[in-house]
Image (cartoon, rainbow, N blue to C red):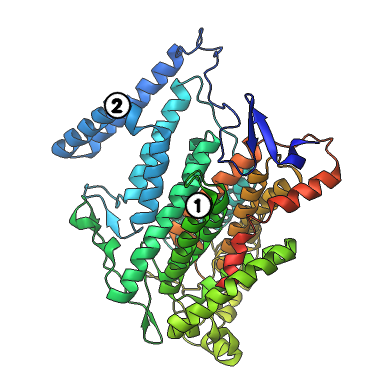
Amino acid sequence: MTALDSGSDVTGGRTITSDSPPVDVRSADRPTPDASSGAPGRVSRRRLITAAAILAVTVLALVVLLPPLIAGGALLVLALLVIFRRFVFAWSTAIVMLVAVIMFVPARRYAIPIPLPFQLEPYRLVLVIVLVALIVALLTKPDFRWRPVAFGVPISILLVTVLVSFVVNGMDLANAGLVETAIGGITQLLLMLSVFFAFRQLLRSERDVMLLITVLTWAGVIVSFFALIERVARTNVFLMLGSFLPLTLLREGGDVSRAGVTRAFGSAQHPIALAVALCLLIPLAIYLAKYAAWPSNAINRRIVYAGAVVMLFGGVLAAISRTAVVVLGVMFLVTLVLHPRVAAVLFAIAFPLVLLAAAVVPKVFDKMVLSFLDVDSLVASQYTSAGMGGAGRLADLEPAFREVAQRPFFGSGFGSRIVIGDEANSFILDNQFLGTLMETGALGAIGLAAFLLVPPIMLLRFAFGQALERRHAALAFTVAVAIAGYIAAIFFYDAFGFFQTFFILCMLLAVGAWLLTEAPRRAKGIASDASTDGAAEAAPTAPAVAGSGGGG
């Protein structure tokens, strides 16, 4: 009998069952002698010189770019960070801080009041601090090694297609005065993707992975709670952060309603983005209902995370987004195809909750769910207000494809479309795939497809054929289902323009990369029947992800 059959593993003389809270399977960062250091644990002179040079450049940049008073304050903060680095720069602290900024500080709403040529948003500052800390650690700590990212190929394909489109359209962009805009778009994309690399390097063990998905899930629960408050009281607490934090509010919140019903923004840039973000977290909440370390009692743990799922679903309802219904439906469909028996059980559990939602908030339920039953009205609504945000998606298809036909292969250049402001030169699509097709052509569409489709395929393969531990197979399936929901959403809003959901995608990809590169795998000689049985046992936890979708 193999470990797969018994659902257990033995590490360090301790038997670990598949239902036990996760522990570190590998001591990935155990200090080891470094050839360049000359002695175990001793930092080499080359690494010290490099780290000192980075610190000197940072200090010089602060002195040159900032006014004396602000530069002095920044240097003081830097000195305090160095003194208390063991506490402040603990990798678990970095994970929590980065998740907190992403989930609680609305993107493009706040800036740190420092005079710079650009708006220094909080997430950018925290991300840069984390990246610098990681780079310094990689250069100065022999036992802190670079972690493989697993998805380097699809990310590279995406970036190559973007750069090729920019180069091919360089002359046209220069003539239209859009080179700076295009370079800014490429820079922003690189910054957004750096979130994935930062989290991947922060995930040094299974404990870090569980910390990330736990903090992310409960952050989503908090956002959902305040979204419900916003829906009722019409007060967004996330736009009040400037009252007690050193932040400057860049723009006030919007007022978006559907058929007279106010929609919540929460900490997102738009109600659609809020709904999609919370939908992506429902899978993680259901996974944690079985595998979270707290509460330790299984029954209490299921009750606590059942409440988390209900709260997340309530946040989705507060956003009143039909896109969320599509996302949840796709996640349920993935489960139905791969595990129909599990999907049927989950549907039976979720159906009474759907009826309860219909009874408690009938108007919201009608706008989100029942509107899909009136096909004629639904289609008609998508043929009105062409070019407007949130409407006219079908009406935008004809003019969009007319532009695509003019430059089918390389598009007009990444970042060439400006859809808001006085310099607007195009219309809002509410369709990331179509926007990518217009900007980067068929080549860019291939890059986008590779970026979004390859990771879940790799994770599903790992879940059903390679994972040794049941909890790892379940987590891989959970992440794949959540990514499938994100893929469905990109056809209904400009996904890359809404940073919070993209960053959640990056966190999911980082967890997936850890699973593919560091989670233990089965021996190649294990019989295929054991593989099938193990996958079937691993799945019920993860498909519960989609089961929530069935309830939405």
| Location of residue 477 with respect to 125 vertically, above or below | below
Residue at which label 1 appears: 301
Q: Nearer the viewer, residue 435 or 291?
A: 291
Name the residue located 61 percent from the left edge and 54 percent from the top edge: 478
Query: Which residue type does callout 1 highlight?
Result: Arg
- Front residue of this view, candidates 526 and 113: 526
Q: Residue at x 38, y 61 (%)?
A: 223
Q: Residue most toward the bottom?
A: 376
Q: Position of residue 354 (x, y in %)?
A: 54, 77
Residue 352: quarter of image: bottom right
Displayed quadrant of residue 342: bottom right
Counting from the top left corner in percent of width and height, residue 249 is at 24, 60
Identify the image quadrant of the C terminus. bottom right
Most distant residue in the top direction: 38
Q: Residue 377 at x, y = what percent? A: 55, 91
Numbered disc 1: secondary structure = helix
Number of numbered discs visible in the structure rendering: 2
Q: Earlier in the sequence, mark 2 or mark 1?
A: 2
Q: Tell me, yes or no, if residue 183 can be seen here.
A: no
- Report the residue at 66% width, 58% height from top: 446
The quadrant the N terminus occupies is: top right
Residue at figure coordinates x 85%, y 45% from the top left: 528
The answer to whether residue 154 is seen in the rendering is yes
> Where does residue 375 sit, x and y in percent of width and height?
60, 89
The residue identified by callout 2 is 82
Q: CA distance from mark 2 to mark 1?
A: 39 Å
Classed neighbour count for the residue bearing mark 2: other residues with Cα under 10 Å, few (<14), some (14–19), many (≥20): few
